[in-house]
Image (cartoon, rainbow, N blue to C red):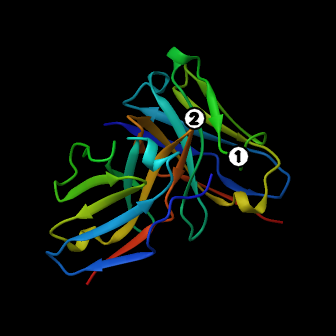
Amino acid sequence: EVLLVESGGGLVQPGESLRLSCAGSGITLSDHYMDWVRQGPGKGLEWIGRSVNKAFSYTTDYAASVKGRFSISRDEFKNSLFLQMNNLKTEDTAMYYCTREMYGGFHIWGLGTMVTVSS
Amino acid sequence: QSALTQPPSASGSPGQSVTISCTGTGSDVGGRDSVSWYQQHPGKAPKLVIYEVNKRPSGVPDRFSGSKSGNTASLTVSGLQPEDEADYYCNSYAGSNNFVFGTGTKVTVL
């Protein structure tokens, strides 16, 4: 069974940083395009960024709302994906999901990890 | 990048059909075949039900179907069942290595 498990969420103050992790089991993450999607409380889904696969050097792309503050990285040996979030704002409060992208869709999702930015 | 436009709500009785629209522009929905749809039950992660406009992942009932005309994509759920009550979101590749989601539609089974 393929599983994605996010971790690292929590309560932080505005301006602080947080690093989220996404661990894969039953799947080799380096073979796949992997994305992060978030959902604010009572709000819709928002795509925030992507890391393409190893064959394309893990190139990353970001939504305008997080570009310059968030960055995506990987650790092949830990079979993990990371989301480094800097200079967090209250509007970044959301459930954060990692997901496997394929054929232009997001086929596998983790359960998510909650990030709350509040003073 | 603006969110794709979906109706806030839709409803139908068990056994009926409901169709949800997703309107974008020629830069996203109209110019791509990378349109996908997601079902989300309260407190749960989203689940892919349609990708590449009209393809169903393994395990998704054939009651779910997708189509596209111009800048508008559609998801139809036929033979509505109580478990189909959920929020539904469309998504499209928007160029420049970006994706955009729809505003979401709450489907109620009456």
Residue A91 found in image quarter = bottom right
Query: What amino acid type is highlighted by mark number 2?
Result: Asn
Residue A21 point in image, percent of width and height? 60, 39
- Whether residue A105 is situated above or below residue A29 in the rendered picture: below
| Residue in view at x 46 percent, y 33 percent | A24
Side (left or right) of A13 relative to A116: right
Which residue is denoted by mark 1 in the rendering?
Answer: A64
Image spot of residue B14 (x, y percent)? 17, 78
Q: Are marks 2 and 1 on the same chain?
A: no
Q: Is residue A42 left or right of residue B72?
A: right
The circle drawn on residue B51 is: none
Structural crowding at the residue carrying mark 2, measured as other residues with C-alpha within 10 Å and reported as few (<14), some (14–19) or many (≥20): few
Q: Is residue A74 left or right of residue B46?
A: right
Residue at x-position 59% and y-position 17%: A57
User: Residue A77 at x, y = what percent?
Assistant: 55, 19
Above or below, A71 against A59 in this view is below
Pointers 2 and 1 in contact (C-beta within 8 Å): no
**Residue A115 image-quadrant placement:** bottom right
**Tag 1 subunit:** A
Q: Residue at x 44, y 37 (%)?
A: A100
Three-letter amino acid code of the residue under disc 1: Ala
Q: Look at the numbered disc 1 and give the secondary structure of its residue.
A: loop
Which image quarter is the N terminus of chain A in?
top left
Can I make out residue B81 in this image? Answer: yes
Front residue (pair A89, A1): A89
Residue B97 bears which disc, if any?
2
Look at the image and tell me whether residue A110 can be seen: no
